[in-house]
Image (cartoon, grey):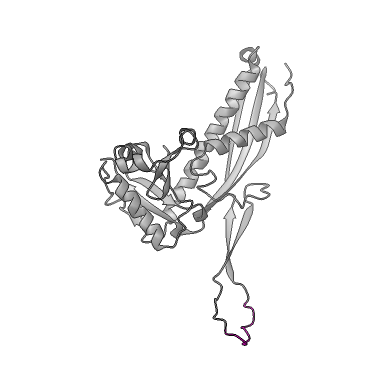
Amino acid sequence: MAIDNFIPEVWSARLLENLHKALVYGQDGVVNRDYEGEIKNVGDTVKINSIGPITIGTYTKNTDITAPETLSGDQTLLQITEAKYFNFQVDDIDAAQQKPKIMDAAMREAAYGLRDVADQFIASLYVGVASGNTIGDDTNPVVPTSSDAYDYLVDLGVLLDEDNVPSDGRWVIVPPWFHGLLLKDNRFVASGSSSADQRLRNGQVGEAAGFMVLKSNNVPNDSGTKYKIIAGHPMAWAYAEQILKLEAYRPEKRFADAVKGLHVYGAKLVRPSAIAVMTANKS
């Protein structure tokens, strides 16, 4: 049985589309993806430049202004450190008359698996949060209730305010149980302005306390305790990815069609003061 009509470019695009739609931590609007560029392999480095402050002077009529200052800044390196793959086969007997459906479902499942691993990797970067931008800790986690869960979101927002983090574009990612507490508070129900269509996309479940609220089962936690509820702005961290390889082949010792793919990516917390983290236990 030959592999008919296999077009690597089409399958690769489909895989990336599924990955982007399914991610929570790695989606546009939560993480900065502007630095992806041309990634060719694991170990590649993406250089991120930032400009330092510019001096503002007072103009006096008929007086020369100062000479132009030389711009200063820093360079941060985002390394592509992760390489994950999938490799599956569909036996010719199983594929009989159903190959397109089986292959399509398998590709969606592969995309989900890659998404899940990358999502958890990005979420793990919370450990670099700036000192002072935390509420609770592993020793003394807070225990939110339906009466104060919304208030804790306000407190996270204040931490970001104090670090001059822009108000527009802020997000917070919560576990399902915390979202359940918010649903019992009229302040959240009244402020959630997302349409029904938006609520089904990318984990978004509403808006509250100046945040786009997203729900995820990948919120870092310690066996069901010490959940790390992260709030922040897309400028806080950067993510770059690439599907490097996608190949269809016939295994030498099988009567089957097989597909394998290689996904490389990296992420970095480039502005530790642009996130705030709350450590919380279920009530």
User: As rendered, which of 221 and 136 lies closer to the eye?
Assistant: 136
Can residue 219 be seen in this snapshot? no
Q: Position of residue 173 (x, y in %)?
A: 42, 44
Q: Is residue 250 visible?
A: yes
Identify the residue shown where x is 27% and y is 45%: 144
Residue at position x 59%, y 72% in the image: 72
Closer-to-camera residue (198/74)? 198
- Give residue 25's position: percent from left, percent from top: 49, 44
Q: Position of residue 13 (x, y in %)?
A: 66, 35
Among all residues in the image, which is located at the extreme bottom? 63
Residue 259 sits in which quadrant? Answer: top right
Q: Residue at x 58, y 25 (%)?
A: 106
Number of marks in picture? 0
Q: Is residue 251 above or below residue 142?
A: above
Please indicate whether residue 228 sits to the left or right of residue 237 in the image.
left
- Is 197 magenta? The answer is no
Q: What segment carries the magenta color?
A: 60-69
Along the line of sight, which residue is nearer the eye, 233 or 59? 59
Secondary structure character of the magenta stretch overall:
loop
Is 65 contained in the magenta span?
Answer: yes
